[in-house]
Image (spheres, grey):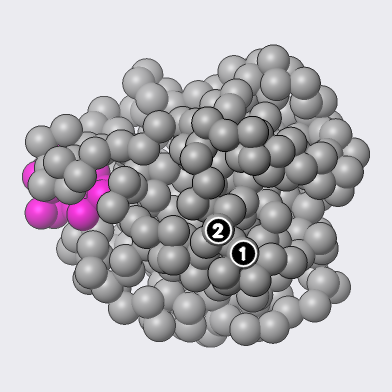
Amino acid sequence: MPSREELICLLGLDPASVETYSVMAEAARISKELSGGRAEVHAQFAVNLAPCSCNCLFCSFAETNKIFHEATELASGEAVACARRFEAEGANAVYMMSTAGHPFERFLETAREVKNNLKPETVLIANVGDQSLKNSIRLKDAGFSGVYHAVRLREGTDTTLPAEKRKRSIRNFQEAGLDVGTCVEPVGPEHTNAELADMIRFTASFHPAYSGAARRIPIPGTAIAGRGLISEWRMAQIVAVTRLGMPRTVMGHCTHEPCALGAIAGANLFWAEAGANPRDTEEKTEESRGETVNSCRTIFSESDWGVWEGRSRYYENADSPRRF
């Protein structure tokens, strides 16, 4: 695996250079070798939408951004219908997302109802706020195979959440027997190559279910939108370097939002989305920014990837070595 200095060097290459093309080609080769040339499409729906006091500046849910003003919540039947639709469309895993302030008991209640109405083999993943070990165990007992959780770039500066609290949650999830998927995100023009290299090394350090990289999507009218947006090409470069920085025990490699350049650079995981989306100003992202399972499959196909059929392989690494 590359050293910190080598990662900084690779990230500092001209994105349009022959060297960067070579880095992307090598990342794609590794991803295809590890996954047999078949990518995965996971699908996420939001169980609620509400202004969030965590005030992550890049998030449309943040109270400070004043995008959403009222709280709404899916009835359990609506959540079941959404999860079953994703299952029927062939998603390799189904994610349930809530805002950080959503009552944990209600999330578990909905999750149990969803789990009871899915096929036993369907992989269910949680995307929730920071949790104690006790709550992490309860997620496992409710039928979740894993979680998505990340220490975001400039955590504690662009958010009100201390980075150590996010790291502690990752430890709690893993101790509870949940596999943790993560990502280097949300990348903006202001983030230095050293910051990116440090985050790549951190995500590699705990042997996640998958890592990857995702660019920040500016929310119109917010203060952070003035920082700008990196290009998909620069994002593809970061995706590729992140793949080189991962242990070979990590099969999955993501980027978001789905794009052909990301797939060409080694991403073998995309998400379809429904309901609220922290990068969208519409309440139903499936009518706006969100991709479908089929559209994600099409992007992979156009990028010369096959797509895995069946339950996700990325959340079946419980025997992989864990270290933090």
Q: Residues within 10 Å of mark 2 (few under 14, many from 20)?
A: some
Residue in view at x 31 percent, y 46 percent: 189
Labels 1 & 2 near each other (Cβ < 8 A): yes
Q: Which amino acid does label 1 sit on?
A: Glu
Whether 203 is drawn above or below 61: the answer is below
In the displayed structure, does residue 319 sit left or right of residue 159? right
Q: Can residue 116 be seen in this view?
A: no
Give the quadrant of residue 244: bottom right
Q: What residue type is labelled 2?
A: Cys
Query: Nearest the camera: 201 or 221?
Result: 201
> What kind of element bears circle 1?
helix
Residue in view at x 39 percent, y 51 percent: 186
Whether 322 is drawn above or below 294: the answer is below
Residue in view at x 57 percent, y 81 percent: 171
Give the quadrant of residue 208: bottom right
Q: What stretch is highlighted in magenta?
A: 57-70
Give the quadrant of residue 38: top right
In the displayed structure, does residue 242 sit left or right of residue 225? right
Label 1 belongs to which residue? 6
Q: Which SS type dominates the magenta stretch?
A: loop
Label 2 belongs to which residue? 9
Q: Is residue 263 visible?
A: yes
